[in-house]
Image: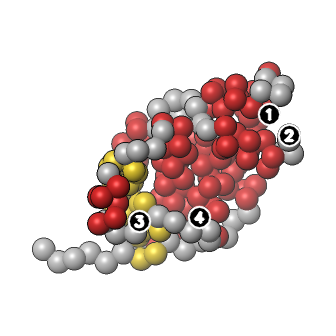
């Protein structure tokens, strides 16, 4: 069997607002509701999630997603992180698949670490997907001064909810 070569993800260069809005629309299109499990979305798109130990991660390619083709991808997560962190990571990797794979149109990977435009775009997608602006504003108003309550509603970390609130000018 020949070794498959992967192209590194390239940015789509859409604005943050455009990506977040697109992600919220995409979440609705695939039937995702705030706080719901993401495994069904990954499966619906043709992907699978692989949890790895620290040893596995050190031996595996420096990637958090590998896209083999349309409707065939793997998301790699450490088995030692919490569910809220994993949810953001999964949504982030879905973002790579939705935003960046169509540009590559060939086997693609996204780096596990880094602060690049590609990673920012995937983070914007994850925030818009998991915490759509209108729903987030509504929930934030229901829980004034209680970011932990907002985070629980969306099943994300308080760090993710705080970042979203700051990005929307609520904090």
Relative side of 91 to 66, left or right: right
- Establish if 22 lies above or below 30: below
Point out the residue furthest to the left here: 1
Label 1: which residue?
Answer: 137
Q: Quadrant of residue 153?
A: top right
Q: Nearer the viewer, residue 106 or 60?
A: 60
Q: In 3D space, how far apart are the residues under numbered discs 1 and 3 (Cα atoms)?
A: 33 Å
What whole-number distance in Å separates the C-alpha atoms at marks 1 and 2? 8 Å
State how far apart marks 4 and 2 are (Cα): 24 Å
**Residue at 70% across / 25% down in the picture?**
149
Badge 1 local density, few (<14 within 10 Å), some, or many (20+)?
some
Mark 1: secondary structure: helix
Q: Position of 114 compared to 149: left or right?
A: left
**Residue at image location 86% in from the left, 45% down from the top:** 169
**Nearer the N terminus, badge 4 or badge 2?**
4
Residue 71 appears anywhere in the view: no
Task: Decide if residue 89 is in sight here.
Answer: yes
Q: Are marks 1 and 2 in contact (CB under 8 Å)?
A: yes
Specify which label sits upstream in the sequence, 1 or 4.
4
Residue 105 place in picture, x, y as percent? 43, 71
Identify the residue position indicated by label 2 in the image.
170
The residue to which callout 3 is attached is 63
State if disc 2 and disc 4 touch (CB < 8 Å). no
In terms of image quadrants, where is residue 35?
Answer: top right
Residue 148, x across and y down, in percent:
69, 29
Is label 4 in contact with label 3 (beta carbons under 8 Å)?
A: no
Indicate which disc, 4 or 3, sits on the residue closer to the N terminus: 3
């Amino acid at each position: 069997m020949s070794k498959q070569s992967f192209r590194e993800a390239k940015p789509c260069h859409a604005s943050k607002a455009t990506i977040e809005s697109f992600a919220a629309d995409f979440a609705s299109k695939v039937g995702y509701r705030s706080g719901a499990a993401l495994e069904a979305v990954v499966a619906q798109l043709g992907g699978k999630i692989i949890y790895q130990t620290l040893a596995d991660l050190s031996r595996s390619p420096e990637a958090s997603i590998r896209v083999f083709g349309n409707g065939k991808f793997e998301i790699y997560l450490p088995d030692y992180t919490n569910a809220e962190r994993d949810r953001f990571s999964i949504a982030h990797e879905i973002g790579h698949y939705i935003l960046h794979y169509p540009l590559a149109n060939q086997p693609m990977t996204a780096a596990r670490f880094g602060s690049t435009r590609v990673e920012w775009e995937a983070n914007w997608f994850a925030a818009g997907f998991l915490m759509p602006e209108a729903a987030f504003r509504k929930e934030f108003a229901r829980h004034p001064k209680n970011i932990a309550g907002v985070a629980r509603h969306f099943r994300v970390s308080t760090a993710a909810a705080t970042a979203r609130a700051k990005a929307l000018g609520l904090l």
